[in-house]
Image: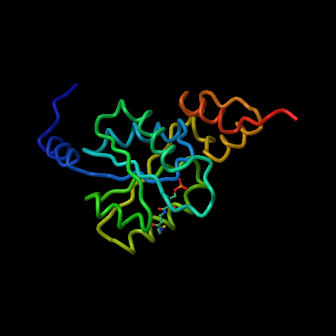
């Protein structure tokens, strides 16, 4: 492979200094999220995976459980930190010294809502950019919502979530037979 040019070297050095945020509900983390963490962590110096605390919708897993699962599955990525936030995402980003937000796009149907959020965030803090990354195609249909539904109805979610999450889901949704 050819040696990187001076411009490429300078760009890589710059990228190594970037601090980015990957925010979400992560209730629970799926293999689609994990795929995005792997992709995003390669592009920046530090990636903060930030779990939203004050959700209107009642989550299946507490904030502690969600961050614990994230810590377990993200431990192979040395530049990834797990955090949590409430209030405005851009304020948390600024407080953590991040000027880049990553969001995953699975299909074109995700785009409209993501665009609205990105533009609102830009209006609130123009110095913070949002970048969209395409999820791995194998996970384009995977969402936390569907995974919870399938698990609660007794379906198999292995391969869609990390094994530690599949195990926790099984325990959480286990219901006594009637
Ligand atoms: O995984 P999700 O539920 O799609 O993540 C949504 C999230 C957490 C990124 C979004 O709800 C968010 O950023 N909430 C924080 C509140 C905020 O900053 N709102 C105004 C800008 S859209």
Tell me: 92 left or right of 58.
left
Q: How many numbered marks does the figure carry?
A: 0
Identify which residue, 178 or 145, lies in the foreground.
178
Measuring from the top left, give residue 14's x and y in whole percent.
18, 49
Measuring from the top left, give residue 27's x and y in whole percent.
57, 47
Q: What's the residue at 60%, 64% (across, down)?
A: 56
Residue 36 quadrant: top left
Tell me: residue 113, above or below residue 28: below
Q: What's the residue at 65%, 38% (across, down)?
A: 172
Residue 146 quadrant: top right
Question: What residue occupies the far top of the structure in this picture?
Answer: 1
Question: Can you say which quadrant of the picture contains the N terminus?
Answer: top left
Identify which residue, 128 or 161, lies in the foreground.
161
Question: How does the figure colour the protein chain or chains?
Answer: rainbow
Measuring from the top left, give residue 23's x and y in whole percent.
44, 54
Measuring from the top left, give residue 110's x and y in whole percent.
58, 55
Tell me: 161 left or right of 175.
left
Q: What's the residue at 33%, 57% (across, down)?
A: 100
Question: Can you say which quadrant of the picture contains the C terminus?
Answer: top right
Question: What residue occupies the far bottom of the structure in this picture?
Answer: 123
Tell me: 93 left or right of 68.
left
Tell me: residue 98, above or below residue 72: below
Question: What residue occupies the far right of the structure in this picture?
Answer: 178
Q: What's the residue at 29%, 39% (across, down)?
A: 79
Identify which residue, 58 or 101, lies in the foreground.
58
Tell me: residue 73, above or below residue 96: above
Tell me: residue 158, above or below residue 17: above
């Amino acid at each position: 492979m050819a040696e990187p040019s001076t411009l490429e070297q300078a760009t890589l050095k710059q990228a190594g200094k970037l601090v980015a945020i990957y925010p979400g509900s992560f209730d629970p983390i799926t293999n689609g999220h994990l795929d995005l963490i792997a992709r995003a962590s390669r592009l920046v110096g530090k990636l903060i995976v930030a779990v939203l605390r004050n959700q209107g919708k009642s989550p299946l897993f507490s904030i502690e459980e969600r961050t614990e699962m994230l810590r377990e599955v993200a431990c192979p990525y040395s530049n990834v930190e797990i955090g949590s936030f409430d209030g405005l995402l851009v304020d948390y980003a600024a407080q953590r010294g991040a000027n880049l937000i990553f969001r995953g796009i699975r299909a074109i149907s995700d785009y409209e809502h993501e665009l609205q959020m990105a533009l609102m965030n830009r209006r609130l803090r123009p110095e913070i950019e949002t970048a969209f990354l395409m999820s791995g195609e194998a996970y384009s249909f995977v969402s936390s919502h569907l995974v919870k539904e399938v698990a609660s109805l007794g379906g198999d979610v292995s391969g869609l979530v990390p094994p530690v999450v599949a195990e926790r889901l099984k325990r959480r949704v286990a219901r006594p037979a009637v």
